[in-house]
Amino acid sequence: MESAALRVPFQNVPVLARIAGPQGGPVVLLAHPFPLHGAAWDPQIAALVELGLRAVTVDAPGFGGSPALGRALRMDDLAQLYSRVLDALAAPRAVLIGCSMGGYAVMAFARLFPERLAGAALICTKASADTEEGRLKREALALTALGKGARAVTAGFVPNLVHDANPEALQRAHELAAAATAQGIADALRGMAERPDSYASLRQWQAPALVLAGEHDKLMSAADTDALVAAIPNGRKHVIAGSGHLAGLERPAEVNAHLVAFLRACQAANAWSRRAAERTPVAL
């Protein structure tokens, strides 16, 4: 399997992207959850490459191999970063897959760059903005990270991401979160707190979309998922049994099966075509 690493400059920060799959293949960009990094998608990469796709993971600033911005990391920032990564790969458009914070970023990308979105899979995420209570909780965690260090946040936060029956996934989530910086955690928390409601934008989507939810997700409710699916024209939902918030780590075989079926449908419908008018409907 061909693989490479790429540094993409973004606001004076060298952001790390990893690429696997055939050069020139249709691009699938995977946006990771908070507070992990791009390697959270390792269980999905081989399945995507086997389809002849080019799988691209990006470490958000402050996570994994990317330095922090030192200010709020807004979801629009991540969307603009993903667009720059596509530019660096000479990819006019891509299917984007996002989990949790990555899902927020995918929705921002769809709003800012609709013609570059060939399709989207939204995993364990929601379209609503934070409540005032939610924003205050994020700010308290941001201050904890800056005052006491990254582990003061991740040690208590990460267990909430994984269903109790998945100890190996929990261990892996802790390993991935260990690469988060205190500044990156604070920046991302503050950026997520600023994100807008995405419902109006979702209703304008023309790209095919798949929504996956974890049966035991402690962060996203069934009502959040249902509202997200209802807002997307022809949106489809599947619930991953036995999973918490990190479905791709906890139940990789089930998640991969849904992603492969979705991406095959995107391929059959020519979803990566140069213009939206050239695309045919995706049969999900």
Image: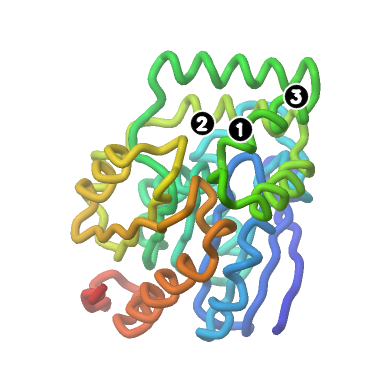
Residue depicted at 46% across the width and 68% down the height: 254
Residue depicted at 25% across the width and 50% down the height: 229
Q: In the rendered image, which residue does mark 3 sit on?
A: 152
Mark 2 vs mark 3, CA separation in Å: 19 Å
Q: In the rendered image, which residue does mark 1 sit on?
A: 188
Name which residue type carries label 1.
Ala
Helix, strand or loop at label 2? It is: helix
165 relative to 71 in the view: left or right: left
Choose top left, top right, bottom left or bottom right for residue 3.
bottom right
Q: How is the image coloured?
A: rainbow
Q: In the rendered image, which residue does mark 2 sit on?
A: 192
Q: Indicate the quadrant containing the N terminus: top left, top right, bottom left or bottom right.
A: bottom right
Labels in figure, total: 3
Q: Indicate the quadrant containing the C terminus: top left, top right, bottom left or bottom right.
A: bottom left
Measured from the top left, where is residue 210 in percent x and y? Answer: 34, 61
Helix, strand or loop at label 1? It is: helix
Is 240 situated above or below 37? below
Question: Residue reaching furthest front?
Answer: 165
Q: Is residue 156 visible?
A: yes
Is 195 in front, or is 257?
Answer: 257
Measured from the top left, where is residue 207 in percent x and y? Answer: 30, 63
Residue depicted at 56% across the width and 85% down the height: 50
